[in-house]
Image (cartoon, grey):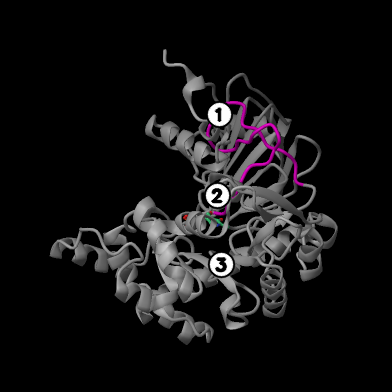
Amino acid sequence: MPNPEILSRLARQTPPFHVMALLERAQALQAAGRDIIHLEVGEPDFPCPEPIMAAARRAMDRGDTRYTPAAGLPALREAIARDYRERFAAPVQASQVVVTPGASGALQLVMGALINPGDEVLLCAPGYPCNQQFVTLVGGVPRPLPLSVDNGFALTPARLAQCWGERTRAALVASPDNPTGNRLAGAELKAMAEFCAGHGGTLVVDEIYQGLCYGEGADSVLRHTADAVVINSFSKYFGMTGWRLGWLVAPAAWVPAIERLAQNWFLAPATVAQYGALAAFDDEALAIAEQRRRLLERRRTRLVEALAGLNLPVVGGAEGLRVLAQNVVIGIDPEGAGLVSLDASGDLDVSTTGENAMRYVGDRLVYSTADETMRLTGKPSVEIRTRLEGAEVVALGQAAIYNLGTGLLRLTGDPVLKIAEGELRGREVVFDQQTKRLKATGRWKMTLNPKTIAKMREGTKKQGEMKTGTR
Ligand SMILES: Cc1ncc(COP(=O)(O)O)c(C=O)c1O
């Protein structure tokens, strides 16, 4: 057995990015035949727009599969710059754009370009968990920029200035943010960028959720100031998570140095993905992306309204892909079904995906649609109320997923489901709203009221209204 001590401190001390570990586990369970609703990672649940796929297919047919320049295809750099000028009125030139392996690659390059060993980088807390690793990778020291739930995790220029120290060389903020869903106003970003520049540092703005804005239209810090470095990606708005393609925008004078890092670290971003992305800014693909943004907006509005009605106050701006709610309890799936999982701290990255599904984990609630009444109470327990043909169903358990699309409600952790017909207890309770089937697995117990028993005797078998059983 090779000695694990031989591994570097970096390798041994880097914590897992829980959401990816969870995705791997869920995929393995799925491959083993388990019924999994994927809600782990922050990726929209729609496929990549067809015009992008068609452009990538054409590139493959042409045999355009070799290395491109390290900073990306010149035509793609130009398309990205043009998009800033045309859609965001931001004066960006192609010479400022570097195409990268996802926003993750861009973050790595920017930290490599700005940070010397020992330099400090301010990171919002709460924030995107991997940012710390990008800082430590280059010997930097992550410093928290603590935000408070009391004011909705609002980040202000004054708060940033307060946390700036002697050794601070950069501050990394996201707008719209993950996980708070907050969006920073142009004037605030400009003030922060000028503060950082005035103190010998740089403001880095992660705009990966730029397209997924629901109140005012999308914006870029680069419309307000040239003093910021921007991170972006094709992952979210264009639904291209698996293509691994992003970009950064930096002052043109810095780009040759950043390109040298890219040459060494990555050689180049994925070629076929770049050819596909060339179609992303065409009217057709943009129209599809916009249509999907509107769909996400409808889901988000429904959820925000439902949460307000359930006395689960939404904290933060609910922009991008996340809605945070207060008073949401911790959910654990004891069977490891891959539906709900979290680490001991409850600090798990969470996300919004899955057609018509809801999930909660840690202190955050994850959704894609929410038409039904949903209430989460106690600790750790969950209570869901839903209406079934006028009758109320109350479900109590430690973890719950209610899927509006399939009508399936799954409860785990000593759950009990109370319906007009009686009560059902089991290790896992599955309630199918469409077929009106109830199923409890593991050791289960059902208590029916007399009316239901009489009805069952009349031969409900034919209607398949209720089915119980063990597994
Ligand atoms: C705030 C933020 N930045 C960066 C990333 C990395 O995205 P990618 O590498 O897929 O572009 C993510 C992914 O969820 C994110 O939420």
Q: Which residue is mark 3?
A: 207
Nearer the observer, disc 1 or disc 2? 2
Task: Name which residue lies at 63% across and 67% down.
Answer: 203
Nearest the viewer among 201 and 322 is 201
For mark 1, does the 10 Å Cα neighbourhood hold few (<14), some (14 to 19), or many (20 or more) residues? few
105 part of magenta stretch? no
Tell me which numbered mark, 1 or 3, is placed earlier along the sequence: 3
Q: CA distance from mark 3 to mark 2?
A: 17 Å
Total marks placed: 3
Task: Name which residue lies at 19% across and 67% down.
Answer: 58
Q: Please provide the residue range marked out in magenta.
A: 328-352
336 part of magenta stretch? yes
In the picture, residue 195 is in which quadrant? Answer: bottom right
In the rendered structure, which amino acid carries the disc numbered 1? Gly
Nearest the viewer among 298 and 248 is 248
- Taking the image as shown, residue 259 lies to the left or right of residue 321, namely left
